[in-house]
Image: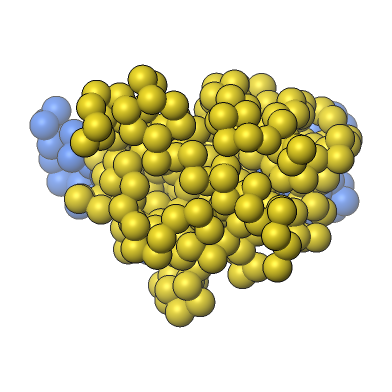
Chain colours: A blue, B yellow
Amino acid sequence: MPTIVVHVMPKPEILDPQGKAVGNALPRLGFEGFASVRQGKRFELTVDGDVTEEILDKAREAAETMLSNPVIEDVVAVEVVDS
Amino acid sequence: MTRIGVVTFPGTLDDRDAARAVRVAGAESVNLFHTDHSLQDVDAVVLPGGFSYGDYLRAGAISRFSPIMEQVVDAANGGMPVLGICNGFQVLTEVHLLPGSMIKNNHLHFLCRDQVLRVENNDTAWTNAYDLGEEITIPLKNQDGQYVADEHTLDALEAEGRVAFRYVGGNPNGSRRDIAGVTNERGNVVGLMPHPEHAVEPGFGPDSREGGRSGTDGIGFFASAINALLTPA
C-alpha cells in the first residue's frame, strides 16, 4: 500500500535535549566521529488506494497543524513511498 | 456561588485535587469531560495536570482537538478565566491560547520538588490575590517542563508584562528566562508548569516556615479567580 511519510525535526534554534543525550552516549559506546545528534519524528500515513494530490494536500495540512508544532518543530519532508 | 469547571481528559491525573482546591477556596467545582460540548454555565475553567493521551505526539497535542476545547477556546476569547496547570498549560499552548511551548527538561529527568516562584504579574484573573514580587512555594513535577519560545516572542512577553511567574532559586528545567508561567494579553488565561492545586490545605502542601507540609501558597490562584468574577474589570 502506498504510504505518505512525514518527517518532523526540532527547529535548529531549539536545543534538542534527547538528541544531545544520544550524542553524548555515542562515544561512550565506541561510536566515534559524530559531532552532534538531533532526534526527530517520522510518521507513516498509509493510504487506501492511490495517493491523489488531494490526499497529499491533506497530509501536508495535517503535518503542519497536528503532527508538528511550529513553535518548536519544522516539517522537513512530506513524501510518498510505495511499500 | 461561583462555579469553576475542571476538565478531565484521558490520562489527566490532578483533576480531583484541582476540584478540591476550587472548593477549599470557596467556589463550587463542576466536573467537565473532554467529550462534552457544553461548559455547563461555569464561570471559569481549570485544565489540570497529568499525561493526557500519554503525552503521545507532544504533551497536550491530542487533547487540544477534543470537543470541550472548542468551548474553552470560545469562552477564553470571550474573557472567561481559564487556568492551565502543567499538562493543562501544554494544552493551552498547543491550542494557541498562550504563546510558546514546552520541551523535555534540559537534564532529561522527571523532576518532583517544592519550587519557589516569584509573582511577576498580579493583574490577572488568577494572580490578583498575590502581591507583585511575592514569592510562593508550590510543587513542581514534570518531564516536559522546559518553556521555549523564539526571542522575539520572549521580548514581547517581557515588554507586555505577560510573564506571570518566574522560577526562583535555580532554574529547574532550562526554561527560557526562568519563565514558569505566562498570561494572555487580556489576563484571563494563565498557564504554568508548577501545581498550585497541591498547596491549598495544611497537612498536604509543601514544607513552610510554619512546619512540614503546611504550605498553602497555591490557594491564591483560586481565590483570585473568585475575586475576578465577583469584581469584573
Which one is in front, B11 or A37?
A: B11
- Number of callouts: 0
Q: Is residue B41 left or right of residue B121?
A: right
Which one is in front, A79 or B26?
A: B26
- Residue B149 is situated, as x and y percent measured from the top left of the image, at 46, 62
Place residue B233 in its image quadrant: bottom right
Place residue B184 in its image quadrant: bottom right
Query: Is residue B72 in view?
Result: yes
Look at 25% across and 40% down and name the residue there.
B107
Query: Is residue B101 in view?
Result: no
Look at 84% across and 30% down and name the residue there.
B36
- Residue B186 is situated, as x and y percent measured from the top left of the image, at 65, 68
Q: Is residue A83 left or right of residue B176?
A: right
- Residue A16 is situated, as x and y percent measured from the top left of the image, at 35, 49
- Residue B137 is situated, as x and y percent measured from the top left of the image, at 32, 42
The vertical placement of B38 against B102, above or below, is above
Q: Is residue B232 left or right of residue B165?
A: right
Which one is in front, B39 or B106?
A: B39
Which one is in front, A36 or A33?
A: A36
Q: Is residue B217 left or right of residue A23?
A: right
The vertical placement of A48 against A65, above or below, is above
Looking at the rendering, in which quadrant would you find the N terminus of chain B?
Answer: top right
The vertical placement of A17 against B187, above or below, is above
Look at 66% across and 22% down and name the residue there.
B10
Q: Residue furthest bottom?
A: B159
Place residue B188 in its image quadrant: bottom right
Look at 46% across and 65% down and name the residue there.
B121
